[in-house]
Amino acid sequence: MTQVYIFDVDGTLIDSMGEWGRALPQFLKERGISYPSDIVKRVIALGLPGVAKYYKENFPVKESEEEIQGNLTEITANLLA
């Protein structure tokens, strides 16, 4: 019988919150979209799907919500690398 263990290292061995805080405005900046200086404070508690929805509803973002989530995840992964 195979045993599988799941271990969440985020917040334990690494902390990605700083990178998420940089990725959220970077996404908009890369698209030339102006945003308020407190954008991170406004959206950080929404979670990734909520941020994507907020961006789609409040900014002229062309990507779908799923694409926004993927792009934010990619930006964050690159910041962590």
Image (cartoon, helix red, strand yellow):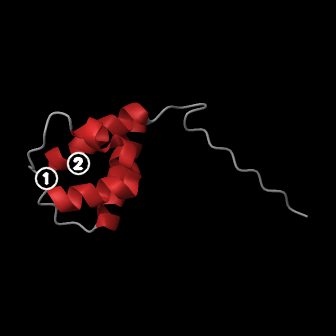
Q: Position of residue 1 (x, y in %)?
A: 91, 64
Q: CA distance from mark 2 to mark 1?
A: 7 Å
From the viewer's perspective, tell me whether residue 62 is left or right of residue 53: left
User: Any mark on residue 27, and which?
Assistant: 2
Quarter of the image where one finds residue 53: bottom left
The residue furthest bottom is: 64
Quarter of the image where one finds residue 60: bottom left
In this picture, is 30 found above or below 9? Answer: below
The answer to whether residue 59 of the structure is visible from this angle is: yes
What residue do we see at 20% from left, 34% from top? 38
- Asked which secondary structure carries label 2, the reply is helix
Q: Position of residue 5 (x, y in %)?
A: 76, 51
Pointers 2 and 1 in contact (C-beta within 8 Å): yes
In this picture, is 75 found above or below 58? Answer: above
Judging depth in this view, the residue of 28 and 45 nearest the camera is 45
Mark 2 crowdedness (10 Å alpha carbons): few <14, some 14-19, many ≥20: some
User: Any mark on residue 31, and which?
Assistant: 1
From the viewer's perspective, tell me whether residue 6 is left or right of residue 56: right
Q: Callout 1, which amino acid? A: Arg
Task: Name the quarter where the C terminus is drawn.
Answer: top left
From the viewer's perspective, tell me whether residue 17 is left or right of residue 60: right
The answer to whether residue 71 of the structure is visible from this angle is: no
Q: Position of residue 47 (x, y in %)?
A: 40, 50
What residue do we see at 21% from left, 61% from top? 56
Judging depth in this view, the residue of 55 and 1 nearest the camera is 55
User: Any mark on residue 50, and which?
Assistant: none
From the viewer's perspective, tell me whether residue 13 is left or right of residue 27: right
What residue do we see at 16% from left, 56% from top? 58
Q: Position of residue 65 (x, y in %)?
A: 30, 65
